[in-house]
Amino acid sequence: MTWFDDGRLHFAVGIEDTFVPQSRPGERAIDEYELTEHYAQYAGDLQLASDVGAELVRWGVPWHRIAAERGRWDWSWVDGVMAQFAELGLRPVIDLLHYGTPLWLEGQFSNPDYPDHVTEYAQRFAERYGDVATDYTPVNEPVIHALFSGEYAYWPPYLSGPTGMVSIATALAEGFVKTQHAIASVLGDRATFVHVDAGIRYSGALDAPEHIDTVTRLRHQGFLVEDLVTGAVGPGHPLLGQLERGGADDTLLDWFRAHPVRPDVMGVNYYPLHSTEVFEAGIHHSGGFADPRPYEDTGTEGLKEVLTTWADRYGAPVMLTETSVTGTVAQRRRWLDASVAALHELQADGVNVVGYTWWPLFDMYEWTWRHTEAPRADHLLTMGLHDLVETPSGSLARRRNPVADTFQRHATEARLTRSAATANSADDVA
């Protein structure tokens, strides 16, 4: 039996791991591990995850650092992290690509050799750490990758428009497929694949008819990479014309259908304050951080909708792989309680929900840090179970806050419920 087959809601935390190491005039490289000092404090950070009762930790690999030079691999820091996972008995869900490629990969995701490079990296990781890490996310939020790097020209390689989106989406999808096959060839049946994408919602189109076509396209695009990797893009797919205009020919689409990969768990990321974008009559926003659309808070109803939609569409157990709110401790605790309750309601309704993830374990820094010269403190996002606190020496301390207590209570209740159910089942058998 795998961890997601026991009928229980499993609790996880995530450590923010956005990496965009490329820079240009007016833009700094961003590495959240460096900003939050996770590189120096990883052992204590994983202990914090254990202390709040997490069973799983979504944790990303800094590909740009372990392969800082083409053909050379430095695993020394990752060795220490994986040893700490093993010592604590925490189960890592490995984020192989949470944005960002090594600096030497010219053109980033649009480089024709990108799929092979990311596959080599993933296979080397699985070969080295397969005794500790058996759960993998090949690409975190590929729809955000494709939008930011391919449609909004916000991140490298700064492509734009629907055709740029197709270019990045198909490259990511090819690397995704090859990565999953490579890991499976190393680990066999021990490998578990947690596909993760953003649960983006769009509203307002009925009141703004000029946006209907855009909203329709964006809604379909939200599933594009997962449709590609699962071999679901064929004749009649609503984005087939866009794919063809973006350079995805029959040979490529046939390849995806011939080499499908499936999620063992379908992960969905949902933030109530940011996951529903609103289109307003007479106003155009390109989207993304550069020109954001307004947001609508649809709370737990939006959460339940996206989880149910993704579960039904791909026929896999579903997991909430990121959620939180930026706000006060009281606001965060209210959302934690409400969102956990929503997942239990879905389970009661027959939806196979297997996991809950609070993201992040400790506060993080907003991506807009990349576009300013302001100090990191100006970009702090209060989202975590632990506060990041600047010390007089300039380093960052982690300070547990009451949100951690609420998380620990839910995680403990879930464990006790399952233990009681297992004991009762054993008594029945006896």
Image (cartoon, helix red, strand yellow):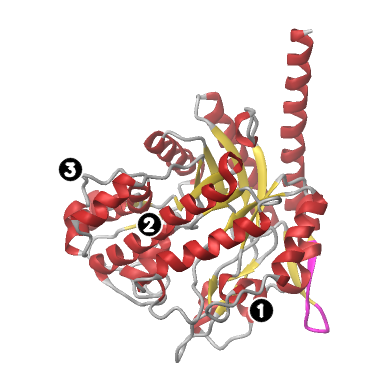
The residue depicted at 55 percent of the width and 72 percent of the height is: 19
Q: Which residue is the site of mark 3?
A: 236
Q: Quadrant of the N terminus?
A: top right
**Is residue 42 inside the magenta stretch?**
no
Q: The disc labelled 1 sits on which kind of residue?
A: Ala
Q: In this view, does 91 lie to the left or right of 151?
A: right
Secondary-structure class at tag 1: helix
At 42% from the left and 40% from the top, the residue drawn is 310
Disc 2 residue type? Ala
| Residue 36 percent coordinates (x, y) | 69, 72
Q: Which of marks 2 and 1 is nearer the N terminus?
A: 2
- Identify the residue position indicated by label 2 in the image: 173
Residue at 50% over, 55% down: 138
C-alpha separation, residue under disc 3 versus residue under disc 2:
20 Å
Q: How dense is the environment of label 3, judged by Cα within 10 Å: few (below 14), some, or many (20 and up)? A: few
Q: What residue type is labelled 3?
A: Gly
Q: What element carries label 2?
A: helix
**Residue at mark 1 to residue at mark 3: CA–CA distance:** 50 Å
Position of 66 with respect to 165 (left or right) is: right
Tell me which corner region of the image, top left, top right, bottom left or bottom right, holds residue 43: bottom right
Residue 306, above or below 112 = above
* Residue at image mark 1: 377
Q: Is residue 413 above or below residue 124?
A: above
